Amino acid sequence: MNEIDNEMSFLDHLEVFRWHLVRSVISIFIFSVVAFIFKDIIFDLVLLAPMDPNFLTYRVLCNISRFLELGEALCIQESPFSLMNISMSGQFSTHIKVSIFAGFIISFPYVFWEFWRFILPALHNKEANVARGIVFFSSSLFLLGILFGFYVVAPLSVNFLGSYQVSETVANQISLTSFISTVTTVSLANGIIFELPVLVYFLTKIGLLTPEFMKMYRKHAMVLTLILSAIITPPDITSQILVSFPLIILYELSIRISARVIKNQNKKSI
């Protein structure tokens, strides 16, 4: 931390943060416009892809089914529902929302980099060097979470909820906004959840978290994991289990990250 940073007032810091925020919003806007223009790719090749029986996830499930000699039990032969638009502005408003969603995902590395540039001057030189790769790891974890949500949780949730019937006389005709909301919410939620190790790293660095604390409340964390999974996923057990599993792994990984941070801090203090 240098003397110039120490001499900056609260309003000066607020002004600096404002410009980081402005640049982040501009980047999101630019990529949102690009996503808006290329709607055929965003919708047909990405968001609506889980409706296609040839979607990657379904092919993998079908191969697993045949490998386990279950026949076609896990194969998806056709979409269990049809999409419909029931609002005059439904498709246009969905187009705008999806474009903003896509713009945020694409620009996430840059947005996080702007955030990192804001807090970097507050760190000591050694701390800054240790956390130099934080933008890369944070962006990678976010992307990994998005991919997990899109290729694992979303298609299974869509097919379970889309094929569920209380009676054969009731056909499933899902609204476009409901389908898109399910896919985008699940994907984004998993992207945010996968940032847990990064959050634990910073909380440990500032002394608000220790590996002992995380181990002591491991059982409580598991319960919170199930509750969080139930909140961010559609109301089916399969989706909740699929989200809970990586959360538990990330929690255990975060304990080791926290322990490593504490170990390095103890070495420096000797």
Image: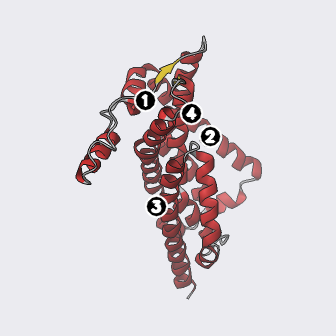
The CA distance from mark 3 to mark 2 is 21 Å
Indicate the position of residue 171 as horizontal and vertical percent values. Answer: 51, 23
The CA distance from mark 3 to mark 4 is 54 Å
Q: Which residue is mark 3?
A: 132
Q: Which residue is mark 2?
A: 21
The CA distance from mark 3 to mark 1 is 47 Å
Q: Earlier in the sequence, mark 3 or mark 2?
A: 2
Q: Around disc 2, counting alpha carbons within 10 Å, would you say few (fewer than 14), some (14 to 19), or many (20 or more)?
A: some
Marks 4 and 3: in contact by CB < 8 Å?
Answer: no
| Residue 35 sits above or below residue 233 on the image | above
Which residue is pictured at 65% across the width and 58% down the height?
Answer: 4
The CA distance from mark 4 to mark 1 is 14 Å
Q: Earlier in the sequence, mark 4 or mark 2?
A: 2
Tag 2: amino acid: Leu
Marks 1 and 3: in contact by CB < 8 Å?
Answer: no
Tag 1: amino acid: Pro
Question: Looking at this rendering, what residue extends furthest in the front direction?
Answer: 168
Question: Looking at this rendering, what residue extends furthest in the right direction?
Answer: 10
Q: Which residue is mark 1?
A: 80
Q: Around disc 3, counting alpha carbons within 10 Å, would you say few (fewer than 14), some (14 to 19), or many (20 or more)?
A: few
Q: Nearer the viewer, residue 113 or 63?
A: 63
Q: Which residue is mark 4?
A: 166
- Disc number lying in front (4 or 1): 4
Q: SS for tag 2?
A: helix
The CA distance from mark 2 to mark 1 is 43 Å
Q: Around disc 4, counting alpha carbons within 10 Å, would you say few (fewer than 14), some (14 to 19), or many (20 or more)?
A: few
| Residue 178 sits above or below residue 128 on the image | above
Q: Earlier in the sequence, mark 4 or mark 1?
A: 1
